[in-house]
Image (cartoon, rainbow, N blue to C red):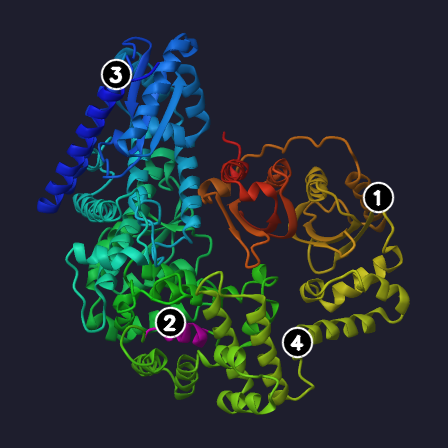
């Protein structure tokens, strides 16, 4: 079938006239709601006219608007999102198919991208149950044409079969994946108005989840259902209007469906919206600052609303036994809550203590919704008197001095607008853009990333990325001073002149106001003032020239300052952009560091990782006392890389060498077990040709024999053999004699090469203690620094068979395990895996993989 060209042309011309009229009205009124509704109404008229021209049947077919079109939020160049729903018998009708094809072809003549789906009622219901994106389209569909009873019946079937809890779970995983695509920050220099964190999509997610749960269909409905307060509702409406205004103007400016605030359009867009340049800020920078402040509000609202819906839908921690953390705070399961609604009113100093108490209790994973709301309302109380109060200053320093969690605390304080109130100098860089080829984040976000990188150097799970940085950071006295330097290193940007000089002045003022010693003040201001010098010398000067190195040494002076400057330089460069940090740049910096270190401490110092590894080798040789020949020892050690020697102690290396030196190429599985004298645990060494399910078979055997894995280190030799060590708890003392240990070695070795299918993971209920102190399951996957592997962080309530259940999911998706760190903190399991595999690079498989991991973390109910 073909639609008459003359009649099609008339519909297209009418639609173009409507769009021109709507654009003119927009420029006069800037009424976002009127503009969006008008575009939707204009498209309704065009779609219905084309449906009539295509001679759509009135029975067995229903046409529905979906997506933004379904919400009547159609932007000037948005896609045409439609659903053509067919009865099952109509789906086989060739004449109907021809009419639909003609209709869809005609839609493209309107000048918009067509996103249309044709489904029978059975197909749609089945696919919506499997795909959260399809389910979302039906949540906001709007009937346009055809058989209304078909549409209503299918919609009723959809809602009847909708699993609100699964929808919420998958929507949260989808949100996290979307955020990761945009670097998990609303502060990218060229954000996407629709998809970036803090964009329009974040405002839509919690309404979708509320609608799927049957809680509300609108913001007003959410307020009436006590999901949001009136102030929150108005904040959300204001955020939406701002973003919608930007997106409408951006579409009209670019004359296409453009949602990215690219550098190319920022200046022109700012001019159209009335922003003016000032002495220190371009009009585009003023616009983007306004955008980032709006994005911050969206993120805050999103966190509060999604937690509220989660509490309603899957249950919060209200039934958990309250545990008093301090006079003002208590724990409800894994949530931190306030002891009363008036905590911050009664004692505003508790605002800062919130983050310190939270960081000191790693068993807590989030703030309660009540706490977040109270914190949001209380933040404006932070003023000059608050900042100058000695008790508040001490609390702030205590947060920075935390051994663990300082970076997360500072990031949360920035996210909730508290950091810029405690440090007025920091407020200037919030949303401050950086117009260069390197930085992809605003100054404040870059600064937080620098602090996170510095804290990352302390953590063993990241030691494989930059072992030298981890070695230096853990040995540096009072490493908290580096965090202050990180906070201030770019704080002078946008103020004119050398930002490092301005930053050093502001850092010195901070140190004196907060009562730091002269020594600490000098150390911090040195780092801020000179934070660019090491990168400059390494990249732009000839570091093979002794005079260049000598000048650098005269500036640095001491090993402590050299170590700190190297760490800050690496953290700074890594926080600019993934493309900036390269192996070449890393080698230049490391060469300069070692050249300077040799001159400062002499050649006797451990200048390289190779030196450290060599020392451990020497110590291991001494421990072996000649029990292994040099030839046999070297044959094994040639297959072990630097990471192995950095991750294992001299004692462990000696034990491994004694056990394996005579079996380097032997394919027969080698299992060696020794009982640790000081604990109820066993250390187990496995050595055999690597295979895909090796880790799974290992933990399956441990679980079957009532052994709980406390720690695991997985290593692959250069020639492809697995060299794995496990620390397992033998709570029942089953392997308490040499004979039983020998039997264990034989049994485990046989299990590792068994080809029989493994049984399903055992089901286990929560212990009584775990029911009162529940841990919210958490799955987080992100690329490591090499971007060749991923770090998988899992948090859940520990139980028998948990590691086995996790390993089964890894095996199912052919995810390879490189290293593993299994940590059990009381009833709480925190596992870190370094993994790779094809599934991690495909969004649909990754979403399913994450969903199954979350289900694996959940204990059996009942």
Residue at 59% of width from left, 63% of height from top?
463
Residue identifier under label 3: 53
Residue identifier under label 2: 487
Q: Majority secondary structure of the magenta segment?
A: helix
**CA distance separating discs 4 and 1:** 41 Å
Q: Nearer the viewer, residue 654 or 739?
A: 654
Q: Depth-wise, is mark 1 or mark 3 nearer the camera?
A: 3
Disc with the residue nearer the chain's start (2 vs 3):
3
Disc with the residue nearer the chain's start (2 vs 4):
2
Percent across and percent down for residue 544 are 62, 85
Q: Nearer the viewer, residue 478 or 673?
A: 478
Percent across and percent down for residue 130 are 46, 27
Magenta stretch, residue numbers: 480-491
Element type at mark 4:
loop
**CA distance separating discs 2 and 4:** 29 Å
Q: Is residue 316 magenta?
A: no
Residues at badges 1 and 2 in contact (C-beta under 8 Å)? no
**CA distance separating discs 1 and 3:** 78 Å
Element type at mark 1:
helix
- The reply to whether residue 477 is visible in this rendering is no
**CA distance separating discs 4 and 3:** 77 Å
Q: Depth-wise, is mark 4 or mark 3 nearer the camera?
A: 3
- The reply to whether residue 466 is visible in this rendering is yes
Disc with the residue nearer the chain's start (4 vs 3):
3
Mark carried by residue 746: 1
Report which quarter residue 608 is drawn in. Answer: bottom right
């Amino acid at each position: 079938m073909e639609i008459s060209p003359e009649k099609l042309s008339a519909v297209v011309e009418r639609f173009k006239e409507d769009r021109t009229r709507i654009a003119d009205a927009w420029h006069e009124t800037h009424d976002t709601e009127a503009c969006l509704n008008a575009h939707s109404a204009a498209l309704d008229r065009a779609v219905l006219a084309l449906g009539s021209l295509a001679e759509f049947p009135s029975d067995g077919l229903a046409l529905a608007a979906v997506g933004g079109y379904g919400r009547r939020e159609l932007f000037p160049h948005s896609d045409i999102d439609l659903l053509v729903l067919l009865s099952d018998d109509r789906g086989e009708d060739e004449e109907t198919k021809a009419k639909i094809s003609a209709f869809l072809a005609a839609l493209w003549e309107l000048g918009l991208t067509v996103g249309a789906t044709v489904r029978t009622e059975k197909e749609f219901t089945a696919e919506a149950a499997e795909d959260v994106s399809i389910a979302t389209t039906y949540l906001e569909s709007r009937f346009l044409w055809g058989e209304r009873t078909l549409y209503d019946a299918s919609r009723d079937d959809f809602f009847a079969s909708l699993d609100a809890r699964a929808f919420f779970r998958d929507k949260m995983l989808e949100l996290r994946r979307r955020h990761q695509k945009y670097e998990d920050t609303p502060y990218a220099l060229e954000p996407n108005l629709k998809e970036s964190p803090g964009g329009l999509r974040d405002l839509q997610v919690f309404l979708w989840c509320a609608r799927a749960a049957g809680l509300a269909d609108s913001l007003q409905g959410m307020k009436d259902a006590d999901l949001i307060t009136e102030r929150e509702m108005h904040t959300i409406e204001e955020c939406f209007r701002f973003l919608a205004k930007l997106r409408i103007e951006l579409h009209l400016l670019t004359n296409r469906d453009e949602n990215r605030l690219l550098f190319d359009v920022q200046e022109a867009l700012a001019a159209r919206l009335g922003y003016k340049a000032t002495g220190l800020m371009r009009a585009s920078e003023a616009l983007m600052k306004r955008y980032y402040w709006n994005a911050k509000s969206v993120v805050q609202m999103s966190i509060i609303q999604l937690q509220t819906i989660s509490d309603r839908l899957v249950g919060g921690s209200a039934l958990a036994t309250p545990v008093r953390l301090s006079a003002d705070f208590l724990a409800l399961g894994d949530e931190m809550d306030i002891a009363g609604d008036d905590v911050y009113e009664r004692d505003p100093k508790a605002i800062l203590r919130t983050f310190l108490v939270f960081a000191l209790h790693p068993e807590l994973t989030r703030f309660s919704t009540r706490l977040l709301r109270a914190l949001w309302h209380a933040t404006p109380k932070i003023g000059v008197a608050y900042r100058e109060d000695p008790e508040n200053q001490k609390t702030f320093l205590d947060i920075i001095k935390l051994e663990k969690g300082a970076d997360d605390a500072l990031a949360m304080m920035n996210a909730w607008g508290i950091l810029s109130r405690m440090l007025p100098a920091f407020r200037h860089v919030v949303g401050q853009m950086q117009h260069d080829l390197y930085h992809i984040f605003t100054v404040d976000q870059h600064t937080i990333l620098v602090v996170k990188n510095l804290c990352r150097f302390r953590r063993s799970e990241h030691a494989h990325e930059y072992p030298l940085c981890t070695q230096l950071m853990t040995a540096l006295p009072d490493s908290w001073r580096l965090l202050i330097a990180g906070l201030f290193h770019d704080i002078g940007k946008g103020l004119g002149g050398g930002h490092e000089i301005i930053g050093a002045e502001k850092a010195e003022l901070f140190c004196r106001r907060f009562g730091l010693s002269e020594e600490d003040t000098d150390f911090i201001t040195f780092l801020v003032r000179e934070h660019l010098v090491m990168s400059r010398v390494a990249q732009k000067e000839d570091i093979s020239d002794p005079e260049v190195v000598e000048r650098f040494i005269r500036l640095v002076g001491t090993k402590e300052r050299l170590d700190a400057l190297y760490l800050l330089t690496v953290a700074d460069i890594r926080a600019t952009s993934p493309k900036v940090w390269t192996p070449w740049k890393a080698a230049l910096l490391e060469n300069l560091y070692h050249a300077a270190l040799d001159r400062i401490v002499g050649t006797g110092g451990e200048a390289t990782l190779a030196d450290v590894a060599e020392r451990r080798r020497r110590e291991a040789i001494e421990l072996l006392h000649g029990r292994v020949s040099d030839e046999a020892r070297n044959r094994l050690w040639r297959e072990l890389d630097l990471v192995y020697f950095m991750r294992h102690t001299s004692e462990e290396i000696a034990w491994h060498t004694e056990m394996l030196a005579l079996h380097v190429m032997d394919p027969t599985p080698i299992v060696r077990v020794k009982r640790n004298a000081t604990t109820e645990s066993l250390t187990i060494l496995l050595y055999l040709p690597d295979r895909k399910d090796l880790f799974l078979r290992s933990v399956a055997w441990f679980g079957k024999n009532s052994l709980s894995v406390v720690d695991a280190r997985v290593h692959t030799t250069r020639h492809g053999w697995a060299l794995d060590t496990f620390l397992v708890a033998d709570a029942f003392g089953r392997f308490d004699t040499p004979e039983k240990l020998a039997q264990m070695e034989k049994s485990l070795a046989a299990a590792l090469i068994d080809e029989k299918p493994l049984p399903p993971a055992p089901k286990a209920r929560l212990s009584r203690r775990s029911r009162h102190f529940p841990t919210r399951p958490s799955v987080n996957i992100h690329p490591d620094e090499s971007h060749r592997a991923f770090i998988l962080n899992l948090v859940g309530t520990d139980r028998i068979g948990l590691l086995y259940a996790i390993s089964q999911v890894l095996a199912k998706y052919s995810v390879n395990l490189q290293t593993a760190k299994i940590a059990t903190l009381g009833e709480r399991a925190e596992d870190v895996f370094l993994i790779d595999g094809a599934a991690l690079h495909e969004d649909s498989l990754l979403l399913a993989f994450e969903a199954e991991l979350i289900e694996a973390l959940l204990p059996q109910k009942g």
